[in-house]
Image (cartoon, grey):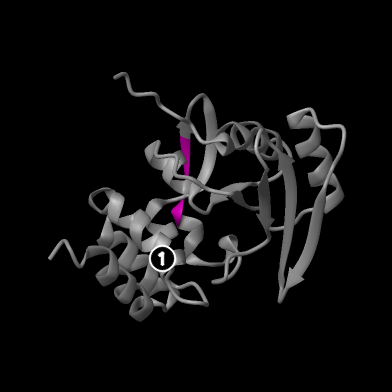
């Protein structure tokens, strides 16, 4: 039996959308797409997370629609505290992929926190992405306001040997969230000990 590599549909959406957004904005990949951009590991996902600190939702919608060749634009915008969140709904073969653009992380704007030093340029499948490092993403998932999710623990277990946990620990310390990070680290690496 020959194995078939199935690339999640969001990968092709990300390539087109990120390239278009990056021509106009300082866009940083976040969310589980960090695994794909940094490691080439495209995990199942229903959305694409990108950070852009200041944006006009109507302009973003037009950029995304043009990049994907869509004649109709469906999106929503809302504010959660001081975070502006934009969702653009991309129709795909089965269902939709949501492109989520956020103006900040739950720990603050990337440019105003130690996360800024954890933004790296990575070329993946002929596209250059500015992305959070795997270590910065681990810190974000460890410190979610609702606590670490089981899915994030499981995902990081898959790549635990590829994460520089000392670097992540330093980032967490600089952000003042070391205790929360250590809980996440133990959840991920409890099988490592």
Is 159 above or below relative to 149? Answer: above
Q: Residue 47 magenta-drawn?
A: no
Which residue is at 67% across, 42% downward? 95
Please provide percent x and percent y for residue 159. Answer: 29, 49
Q: Which residue is mark 1?
A: 139
Residue furthest out toward the top: 2
Quick check: 156 left or right of 20? left
Quick check: 181 left or right of 116? left
Q: Quadrant of the N terminus?
A: top left
Residue 56 appearing in the image: no
Residue 65 sits in which quadrant? top right
Quick check: 73 left or right of 31? right
Which residue is at 20% across, 68% downward? 190
Label 1, secondary structure: give it.
helix
Q: Quadrant of the C terminus?
A: bottom left
Tally of numbered discs: 1
Q: Nearer the viewer, residue 114 or 179?
A: 179
Q: Which residues are magenta?
A: 118-122
Dominant secondary structure of the magenta stretch? strand
Residue 45 appearing in the image: yes
Residue furthest out toward the left: 193
Is 179 above or below relative to 6? Answer: below
Is 112 above or below relative to 38? Answer: below
Disc 1 crowd, CA 10 A, few/some/many (<14, 14-19, 20+): many
Please provide percent x and percent y for residue 121. Answer: 48, 40
Please provide percent x and percent y for residue 157. Answer: 29, 56
Which residue is at 44% across, 65% downward? 141
Which residue is at 72% across, 41% downward? 90
Q: Nearer the viewer, residue 92 or 21?
A: 92
Q: Nearer the viewer, residue 97 or 107?
A: 97
Please provide percent x and percent y for residue 23. Answer: 70, 35
């Amino acid at each position: 039996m020959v194995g078939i590599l199935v690339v999640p549909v969001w990968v092709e959406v990300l390539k087109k959308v990120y390239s278009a957004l990056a021509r106009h904005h300082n866009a940083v990949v976040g969310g589980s797409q960090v695994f794909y951009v940094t490691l080439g590991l495209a995990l199942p996902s229903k959305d694409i997370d990108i950070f852009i600190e200041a944006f006009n939702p109507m302009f973003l919608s037009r950029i995304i629609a043009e990049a994907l060749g869509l004649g109709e634009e469906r999106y929503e915008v809302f504010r959660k505290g001081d975070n502006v969140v934009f969702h653009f709904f991309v129709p795909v073969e089965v269902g939709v992929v949501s492109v989520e653009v956020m103006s900040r992380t739950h720990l603050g704007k990337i440019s105003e926190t130690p996360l800024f030093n954890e933004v790296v340029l990575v070329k993946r499948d002929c596209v250059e992405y500015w992305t959070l490092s795997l270590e910065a993403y681990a810190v974000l998932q460890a410190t979610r306001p609702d606590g670490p999710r089981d899915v994030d623990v499981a995902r990081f277990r898959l790549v635990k040997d590829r994460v520089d946990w000392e670097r992540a620990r330093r980032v967490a310390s600089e952000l003042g969230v070391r205790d929360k990070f250590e809980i996440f680290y133990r959840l991920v690496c409890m099988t490592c000990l």
